[in-house]
Image (spheres, grey):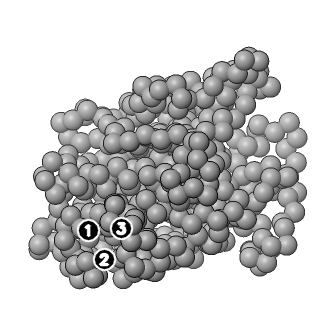
Amino acid sequence: MANVTGDDIAQCVINTFQSLPAKRKPRQRTDGKREWVPLSGIVLHKDGLPLVCASLGTGMKCLPRSKIAQAKGTVLHDCHAEILAIRAFSRFLLYECVAAIASASQYIRLRTGDELADSRPQPFILKSDVSIYMYCSEAPCGDSSMELTMQAQEDATPWEVPLSEEVSDILHDKGDALMGRGHFSKLGIVRRKPARPDAPQTLSKSCTDKLSLYQCTSILHGMTSLLIVPEGAYIKTLVLPYTQHIPTATQRAFGTTGRMSNLTIDVTRNWPEGFNFNSFHIDTTLMEFAYSRRTSGREENMLLPSNISTVFTPYFQETLVGGVLQGRKTSDPKGASAICRKSMWQAVVKLMQLLERPSMEEMPIKKTYEQVKNSEVLRDRRRVKAEVVNLALKGWTRNQGDEGFELDEKSCHNV
């Protein structure tokens, strides 16, 4: 496939979703109302091979900040479609790493001895002829969709959302830098995941903000970055429906002349090897997802948001409710998704065992999740993130409270 178009990417993700069983899709209610849900997917293109949907996610829910401390690594904080698709892509790559050990992966390879260094010991890298594309059925929440949000309001007066005393203490003088949908006139700022004024507040950053950061750190999850270097793990093109694309908004949010403009060559040339500001191209499609707000029903009052999230990779698929597997309580460890923090960490440990590198004594098992995130291997990633936040995404506040868990011995033996 010489030229990959927006329609090609959208079709690949939509067709993959349509192939899933009905239990993973929004429902038609008996009262005639129809559920809708956002869809996002990651598509891989490799020379000589057809496009592959490596991962997809649907969903629009987010864990309130008050519940974060109870997650203990097994409850997903952010179930927006874009974030689920990206997390699932990292999980897909971990499966591909296992295949790469046997030289059976189309997308990942082991790095050679002369490529390894003390500062870059990760054993895997994406193959050089692999390109990454992303499709979103809705404009990502946050700054890139503010004009669309304004257009959709009967009353465009910004919501005056009073910050709770707890959140105010955290944000200090950052104030409106972490608003949800409020204050439409303020553009180019970091925002929380949107929610109704009366909904429990979250400190999870908007999908726009997270995608902006991933243009610099790559879309690899932190745990996956213990094994895979960032080269090649950047989105080449983001595809949006034509009706969901406001060029001035996406340029302001993601582009080199918008809020990311401080990340000049003089800045990025000093970043560690493998990291760069890889501003993705925005393409559009006239195709519409069958379960979007625009096609799920003719009347707005006949639409209801779906409460389920779907996760898919060619290796597994899941249905989630409230950040855990459908039918499980959030307090049940058996409800852990394959893409939650603990599961991703366990998968990395398994790969380290397969590689026998590093030794068992050096593997990040008997540590907390936070200690692993602060490990030497991830030092370069932390540095790049810090510079991006300081120069472009000011007001980014960590959503803390779920970093102190460990992998118990039983978990380690069964990964």
Residue 373 pos. (x, y %)? 45, 75
- The tag on residue 363 is 2
* Label 1 or label 3, whichever comes before in sequence order: 1
* Helix, strand or loop for disc 3: helix
Asked whether the beta carbons under mark 1 and mark 3 sit within 8 Å of each other, the answer is no
Tally of numbered tags: 3
Asked whether the beta carbons under mark 2 and mark 1 sit within 8 Å of each other, the answer is yes
Decide if residue 197 is on the left or right side of residue 386. right
Q: Where 378 falls versus 74 (above or below)?
A: below
How packed mark 1 is, by other alpha carbons closer than 10 Å (few <14, some 14-19, many 20 or more), is: some
Instruction: Give the alpha-carbon distance from disc 1 to disc 3, as whole Å.
Output: 11 Å
Decide if residue 257 is on the left or right side of residue 381. right
Q: Mark 1 points at which residue?
A: 352
How packed mark 3 is, by other alpha carbons closer than 10 Å (few <14, some 14-19, many 20 or more), is: some
Q: Where 15 falls versus 214 (above or below)?
A: above
Identified at 36% across, 82% down, the residue is 376
Q: Of 307 and 147, which appears nearest the observer? A: 307
